[in-house]
Amino acid sequence: MKHPLSTRFPVRLLQLAFLSALLMTSAAHAATTLLGMRSDPGDWIGGGQSYLYFSSDGIFAASRNFDNGVSISFSSLDGLEWWNLDFAAPFDEPLVPGVYPGAMRFPFQDPDRPGLDVHGNGRGCNTLTGRFRIHQVEYGTGDEIIRFAATFEQHCEGAIPALRGVILFNAIGPAVP
């Protein structure tokens, strides 16, 4: 379920929520999981709305994808809202903290380009451009993702309106942006 403050709140509120989560994780060293997104008017994926989901709003799952990247999914408790986020580094390398500009739609990106795809609630892009920054990533055994923190920006079909957001999955403390 979308957090009550999530309907069309300004980007400053999204930033404030993100910073509050960071302060809480830094102070208590507790893991934080959330998905926050802001969609420009005209952006197909977010429909010009803002979204903020916490672990109490639904189920988050993370795993490695076949490009050696990270895939995260969210499904609301009532099953009415769902989102999938995919991130991949160029050349099938594991993701590491840093900036990944020039992203193309995952899993169809050129081998030398990063892959990105944020889709959900029945909406997806055929093609996209974008960028993302990995702030924290910790891999477990096999396909397990222990911690992940990223910010992203994606543009569908070459359009100017963007979907911007942050994903935290069990992110902890000062290593988080």
Image: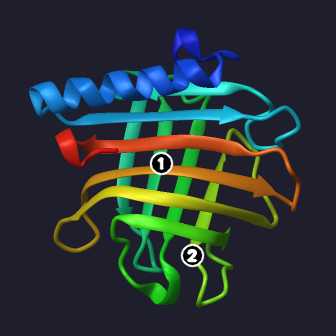
Q: Position of residue 84 (x, y in %)?
A: 55, 50
- Mark 1 against mark 2, which lies toward the viewer? 2
Q: Residue at x 62, y 25 (%)?
A: 11
Q: Is residue 172 above or below residue 150?
A: above
Graded by Cα atoms within 10 Å as few (under 14), some (14 to 19) or many (20 or more), the crowding at tag 1 reads: some
Q: Is residue 35 above or below residue 90?
A: above
Query: Which quadrant of the view contains residue 60?
Result: top left
Q: Nearer the viewer, residue 58 or 108?
A: 108
Mark 1–mark 2 distance (CA, rounded to whole Å): 19 Å
Q: Is residue 10 left or right of residue 53?
A: right
Residue 54, can we see it? no
Q: Position of residue 17 (x, y in %)?
A: 43, 21
Q: Is residue 49 left or right of residue 60?
A: right
Q: Is residue 120 left or right of residue 91?
A: right
State the SS at label 2.
loop
Residue behind mark 2: 114
Q: Quadrant of the C terminus?
A: top left
Display colour scheme: rainbow
Give residue 91's mark.
Answer: none
Q: Is residue 5 above or below residue 117?
A: above
- Three-letter residue code for mark 2: Pro
Q: Is residue 94 above or below residue 80?
A: below
Residue behind mark 1: 73
For the residues bearing labels 1 and 2, Cβ distance under 8 angstroms:
no
Query: Which quadrant of the view contains residue 139?
Result: bottom left
State the SS at label 1.
strand
- Three-letter residue code for mark 1: Ser
Q: Is residue 42 left or right of residue 163?
A: right
